[in-house]
Amino acid sequence: MMKKLVCLLLILGLTVPLEGCWSRREINELAIVLAAGVDSAPDGEILLTVQIARPSSFGGGESGRSGVAGPQQNNLWVISQAGETVYDAQRRLETKVSRNLYWGHTVILVFGEQIARQGIRKAFNFFTRSPGARETIWVLVARGDAKEVLNSHSQLETTSAQGIGAMIRAGVGIPVMLKDLSLMLAGKGINPVLPRVELTASGTPQGPGMKENIPEAENEPDHGTQTHAEMTITGAGVFNDERLVGWLDMMETSGLLWLAGRMKKAEITFPSPNEPGKDFSACIYRSITKIEPFYDGQNIWFDIKMRMDAELWEEQSLEKITEPRIFTAMEESLTRRVEQISRAVLEKAQQDYEVDIFGFGDVWHRKYPRQWPALKDRWNEEFANADVYISVQVHIRRTGLTTNRVSRED
Amino acid sequence: MLEGGKINAWQAVFLNVIMVSATALLGAPAIMASQAGHDAWMSALLATTLGLPIAWITIKLGSLYPGQTLIQYLERILGRWPGKALGLLYLLYFTHITSLMVMEYGSFLVDVFLIGTPITAIVLISITISAYILKLGLEVLARTNQFFFPWILVSLVITFLLVIPEMDLTRLQPVLETGPAEIFKGSLAPLAWHGEIIAFAMIIPFLTKPGQAGKIVALTFIFLGLIFFLLVAIGLTVFGPGLANMNYPILNVARVISLATFFERPEPLIVAVWVTGGLIKVSFFYYIIVLGSAQLLRLKSYRPLVLPVGAILAALSITVSASTLAMSDFIAHYWPFYALFTFEFGFPAALLAIALIRNRGIKGQ
């Protein structure tokens, strides 16, 4: 009898752990941060801007983003707060935000231009230390303030942060995760490059119930300005260690990725060899870069060999590319263009910015481990003075659905 | 006989592997990398090699005194009172490192997953479960481990396979840049981990075939070599020498896994490995303390000691170290010397020497 009673009590006791635990965090008690921006504030403080999701306005249904006319909802809340540190700013945000900030789903971290020029080290330790945030957050640098960039939404994705995340994942610009940034800042053989974002005027949203954006409608009372600003990747920011020193445009970013051997896919336009003013466009879908460093005790030089495969996507001219001679000339033109782009970014890095953004230092270090300690503290100077020999070979392997253009007269 | 149970060879191998490596899974790669940089994978291999003599001493002592545990043959080797004194020191040492293990075990969970939960709660729950296992005896401990071991291994292997896309072998180059001294220093902490094999001396008598102890240890070291090497090599190829500054690098390794954006965040695998492996490790050492104390005091049963020792372990685990930073500093910089010079290598080697000399004397007569 006694035994049965004890058993019963024990079984009843099991219900205690079943009900959950303390310090649990339910999803409706969290403020999910999708994007974080860090700017510099007066008095050496940090201005933290967060994009907080409002999940109730997300998933479709009657109130969400269904195309049918209805009151448009805000699915984001963007709020800024200054603080001594990021954590301090977050803590102070708790006086304005009713829920706990949750960093586990943060997609992007954006540094403002000003704090990037002052140095980013002081601004991102929180994100690698706190177990909530992930090391797979995409890191970007804003032209202007990060705060302005985060004040945006996306037409296609639920939020602008997810929009940018999707673009970077698809290979636009130069993808850098938080863990990559930490690694780049940990060594002297490479300097960080972060993709640059800014808001650009991006088309006019259309839909039933919305006024067409024609000049005649301008005087109508409910004709708002329909120009939409979307977060856009417009190149990359070059850092000397932790400080932003300059920018690269999208083409130069491609050159950087080719030289560093990190490119996956790139579109490129090159002039027709025979018909001036006309262009070809191709997509480079495979690219292998071999970097061979050399050192003779005095001079440092690099041999860079790039082998690429491309597919032709557009031809403006009337050339008969089925002729081997013309085809070869076309491939040569493409090769020259790739070389030109790579050389342009190399010269910019060596002469304008004097920073090794390609990781040549790491490659050199691997080949000359004994000489590295003596050089590593002035590696950027050595890099700026190094000779770099680039040899490129691009082959066009595919030409799409047609050989010569169909509209060509024979 | 204090312990009626018997364990077979495979159970012993599994138990040994977990008993040594469970707490090394998350933090050890960082300790190695902080000394040996990107050459830390050599430290791991070196540690396994240098651990072999300790294993050999353990086996040799066991074969000289069949049917007896470490605590029992200490008295045979050194005489009654010196033997008892050293036995007491051994028990205190095991208590010390076990309380550290309990703290490590709880700290990880509180640091990363159960933020805000008092560590006391985790410590009490784990000690309670361990105490229950102990009450049931060595056989149950071995079978529990036999059940979890494959899952631990599978979870680790899955994690390692999934992180392959994030690996970059060039991060291991240039090979041998750090120099032999640093690689040796980096191997000390993992060597101290391997040295925990000395605890095997406490359960050799309970093997179904004690003669297989040598084979068991050899297999254990193959497992350990692979585990330690893979842990640090994978950590390095994913994070490079930056590994050195991470508290739980293997957790970070799991966190960067992302397959085609839909298979992400497999950290529960790591938690499963830690929760089960850590618990078995704690239980094993807890068992050894309790059994050893009973043998030292010539008790008829070790069971009355289970709860008191558990209370001591729980209390110590909370006070043994002021912070996680102090704890990892101790494990990285003090424990290897403390353990290797004394209880893991120094004392056993001296004991073996004395035992061999005494045995020769006996034979000579």
Image (tube, coloured by chain):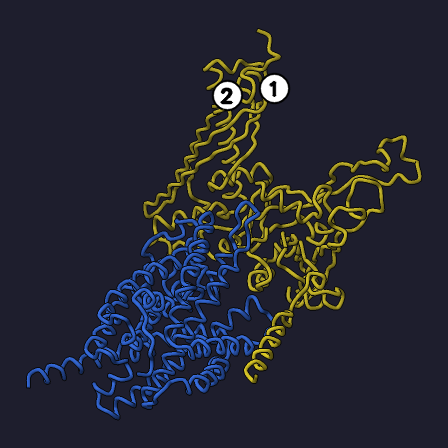
Chain colours: A yellow, B blue
Residue B290: x percent and y percent?
38, 83
Could you say which is closer to the camera, residue A60 or residue B47? A60
What amino acid is at disc 1?
Answer: Gln
Give the number of the disc on residue A330. 2
The residue under the point 37% across, 60% down is B227
Chain assignment, label 2: A
The residue under the point 33% across, 61% down is B223
What amino acid is at disc 2?
Answer: Met
Q: Which of the image's four quarters has the C terminus of chain A?
A: top right
Residue A248: x percent and y percent?
58, 42
Q: Is residue B351 above or below residue B31?
A: below
**Residue A50 in sight from this viewpoint:** yes
Q: Is residue A392 above or below residue B282?
A: above
Residue A400: x percent and y percent?
55, 22
**Residue A380 in sight from this viewpoint:** no
Which residue in the structure is indicated by mark 1? A316
Label located before the other in sequence (2 or 1): 1
Q: Secondary structure at mark 2?
A: helix
